[in-house]
Amino acid sequence: TVDDGATLTVNGATIDGNAITNKSGGTVALTGSAALKNKTLNNSGHVNVSSTGNTFDNEIITNTGLIEVLANGALTIDQGSSVDNTNGQVTVDGNATLTLNNAGINHGTVTNSGTIRSTGGGAIDNADINNTGLIESTVGIMTIDPAGTHTLTNSGTVQANGGELDITSELVT
């Protein structure tokens, strides 16, 4: 458990099979080649991702706080991981990359100024998306599929670039 005002820094390490609870006001910092895998992350605070090689592998994430991929950072969410982002925010800063590989983000708000890439199947469902960067599918099928009224506000690029991109029932502005 990461308490209010505390920080858990994971750098060049893997936390495998352990549940992590990050309370409101707490911070989990993935600072390079960090992996959370095979259990759960319950985040009410901040998850800050910097540098490259960071992954959520087969991780079940409940996010009511903020997951932010910082400039020049990279996070891969893969191996069947899921992010329940109800009342949460996922942010990809400029020059940052979020890769979805057989993984998805559901609910909440997704704000992208960098790159969101699907490399083997990915989904952003039931979420409001603000994109000034690049959202692309390079391999497999990426879906953007809301239940209810959600909006993809786009002044960037949304493209299928070797993969398939399916946008269903999403208002695109």
Image (cartoon, grey):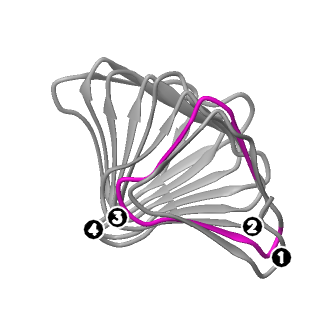
Mark positioned earlier in the residue sequence (3 or 2): 2
Left/right of residue 137 with respect to residue 166 in the rendered view: left
Q: Which numbered tag is attached to residue 73?
A: 3
Circle 4 or circle 2, nearest the eye: 2
x, y percent for residue 12: 38, 57
Mark positioned earlier in the residue sequence (4 or 3): 3
| Amino acid type for the residue under numbered disc 1 | Asp
| Amino acid type for the residue under numbered disc 4 | Asn
x, y percent for residue 126: 67, 35
Residue hosting label 1: 4
For marks 1 and 4, give the CA distance. Answer: 29 Å
| Secondary structure found at label 2 | loop
Circle 1 or circle 3, nearest the eye: 1
Which segment is the magenta one? 24-42
Residue hosting label 2: 45
Left/right of residue 53 with respect to residue 80 in the rendered view: left
Circle 4 or circle 3, nearest the eye: 3
| Secondary structure found at label 4 | loop
Residue in the picture at 74% in, 62% down: 65
For marks 4 and 3, give the CA distance. Answer: 8 Å
State the residue in front, 134 or 154. Answer: 134
| Amino acid type for the residue under numbered disc 2 | Gly
